[in-house]
Amino acid sequence: MQEFWNERYAQPVYAYGEQPNEWFKAQIDRMKPGKILLPGDGEGRNGVYAATLGWDVNAFDLSSTGKDKAIQLASKHAVQIDYKVGELTEFNYNKDSFDAIALIFTHFAPGLRFNYHQILSKYLKPGGVIIIEGFRKEQFERLKPGEKGGGPKNIEMLYSKAELLSDFKDFEILELKEEDVDLDEGDFHKGNNAVIRFLGRKKG
């Protein structure tokens, strides 16, 4: 997978654009800046945007090329982000250390999603929020040859409401909705897509 993402991010143009994801932006704009973690932040469009608002941004991704472009984007906006390269399990963040965690089109390999969500939940402070936007399972039908839908080609990597309710059963669910949205994020998120949007607050 690392090779796949390095290749995708190898072009000078930003694969998913330089602007933040709309759902992420809508949530982060109304929050008091604190410390945020962005797993799978790719070329940094969301992390850099959060940094411009005053957030202390920690991000990671499998792609070293993605990191390089994220640092370039941060420099362009005169902000700094702490960006690491690797898998979630390679890092040891402190328990209860983040005010927010954002998973924006971050789709984990089959069998890892539940465990990774539990790990991330431990890193979140009580009262902190998790922001998720991802492709839901209905998107699979839009991944056929000739279709323009984005997302993993493995249906097990796509989200469902039931899975998110199970993974975050101890959270206060602030928003959880399935929507068909028109995406215009670079070259790879185009047209009408089946997404799920989640906002949950850690109890305690």
Image (cartoon, grey):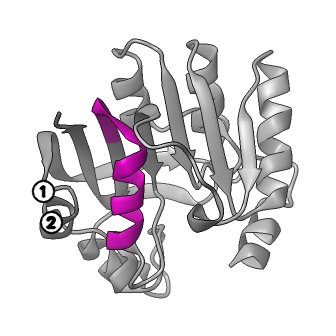
* Corner quadrant of residue 174: top left
The answer to which of 146 and 78 lies nearer the viewer is 78
What is the three-letter code of the residue carrying label 1? Lys
Identify which residue is drawn at 48% across, 80% down.
109
**122 left or right, relative to 3:** left
Residue 104 screen position, x and y as percent? 46, 49
**147 left or right, relative to 74:** left
Above/below status of 91 relative to 27: below
Above/below status of 17 relative to 52: below
Q: CA gap, disc 1 to disc 2? A: 5 Å
**194 left or right, relative to 67:** left
| Residue at mark 1 | 169
| Residue at mark 2 | 166
Asked if disc 1 and disc 2 are in contact, CB closer than 8 Å, the reply is: yes
Identify which residue is drawn at 23% across, 39% down.
202
123 in the magenta segment: yes
What is the three-letter code of the residue carrying label 2? Ser
The answer to which of 91 and 52 lies nearer the viewer is 91
Q: Residues within 10 Å of mark 1 (few under 14, many from 20)?
A: few
* Corner quadrant of residue 17: top right
47 in the magenta segment: no
Q: Quadrant of the N terminus?
A: bottom right
Residue 204 screen position, x and y as percent? 17, 33
Dot 2: element: helix
What's the magenta region? 114-130
Dot 1: element: loop
